Amino acid sequence: MTRRSSHPKLVVANWKMGLSVHESTQLAKKLKSSHVLPPDCELVLCPTFSSLSAVAEAKPSKVGLGSQDVFWERHGAFTGEVSVDDLIELGCRYVILGHSERRRLLGETDEMVRRKVFTVMARGLTPIICVGETAEQRRRGLAHHAVARQLQAALKNVPPPRHGQTVIVAYEPVWAISPGGPATPTDARDMAGVVHQGLVDHFGQRLTERQTRVLYGGSVSAETVADFVDGEHLHGVLVGAQSQHYVSLAALLRALSER
Ligand code: PGA
C-alpha cells in the first residue's frame, strides 16, 4: 500500500464544546489576522453548532468549516436536531460523524452513523467518519477487528463519492483521546492500513486512492503531529484540545508544515 498524497496535509480542529461563541469567533479572527496557515496545510474548523455562523464570518476564507454532527433526516418533526441543509446554508463543507464521545455519551449506534454518512454524502459534503477501538478491545487483541467492523458498518450500502467529493476517515483510538496519551505512530500507521483496506473493499482501489483520506486523532500536539502525517498512510490529523488555543494550534500548524 503506497500512496504518497499530493494533497496538502489536513488539520481538522474539533473544538468540541470547549469554546463559547465569543471565544470561537475570537480564535477564528486571530487565525485570519495572523496569516498562520502554511501553504502546504489545509485547516478545517469545527466549532459548536451555535458558533458556526459567527466562525464562518470571522475565519480566513481559505480555512474550511465543518460541524461536529448532523441529523440524518433532511426536514421534519425532530426537536433539537440540525439538518444538513442548514449546515450547507451556514457554509459547512465537512461533517464529523460517529465521534466516540457521541457513541459513548449519547448512545450513537453504527446504524445512526451510517444514516448520517448517507445523508451527508447525498448532499455533496465531506464526511469525517470517526472509528477507533476502546482500551479493552486493544487489550484483548480485537483492535483491528473493531475498527474494520465500525468502518464497514458506517459505509454499508453507501454509494461511491461523486466526482470531486472526498470521504475522510479519522482513526481515533478511544483511549488516546485527551486526557489519554497518543497512540504510537507505528500503531497509527498500522491501523491506517486497516482503514485503507476497508475503503478499498467498499469503494475499490481507484476511488480510494483518489477520493479518500485517512487521519489520525487522539492527543495530537505540536510535538507529535509530524510523526502522524506521512502523506502515504496518514494524510492529516483530527485535533481536539490542542486546537482550541491560538498558541498551540499555530505551533501545531508550523510543526506540520516543517516536517
Ligand atoms: P484530543 O481530541 O486531540 O483532545 O485528544 C481529539 C478528538 O477527540 O477528536
Image: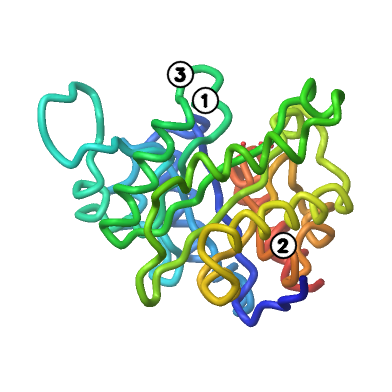
**Label 3 crowd bin: few (<14), some (14–19), many (20+), radius 10 Å:** few
Disc 1 secondary structure class: helix
> Reading the chain from its start, which is encountered first: label 2 or label 1?
1
Distance from Cα at disc 2 to Cα at disc 1:
24 Å
Q: Is residue 172 above or below residue 222?
A: above
Q: Which mark is residue 103?
A: 1
Mark 3, residue position: 106
Q: Position of residue 218 (x, y in %)?
A: 71, 40
Q: Is residue 37 above or below residue 112?
A: below
User: Marks 3 and 2: in contact by CB < 8 Å?
Assistant: no
> Reading the chain from its start, which is encountered first: label 2 or label 3?
3
Distance from Cα at disc 1 to Cα at disc 3:
6 Å
Q: Position of residue 123 (x, y in %)?
A: 26, 57
Query: Which residue is depicted at the point 53% across and 58% down?
Result: 202
User: Marks 3 and 1: in contact by CB < 8 Å?
Assistant: yes
Residue flagged by tag 3: what amino acid is it? Leu
Residue flagged by tag 1: what amino acid is it? Arg
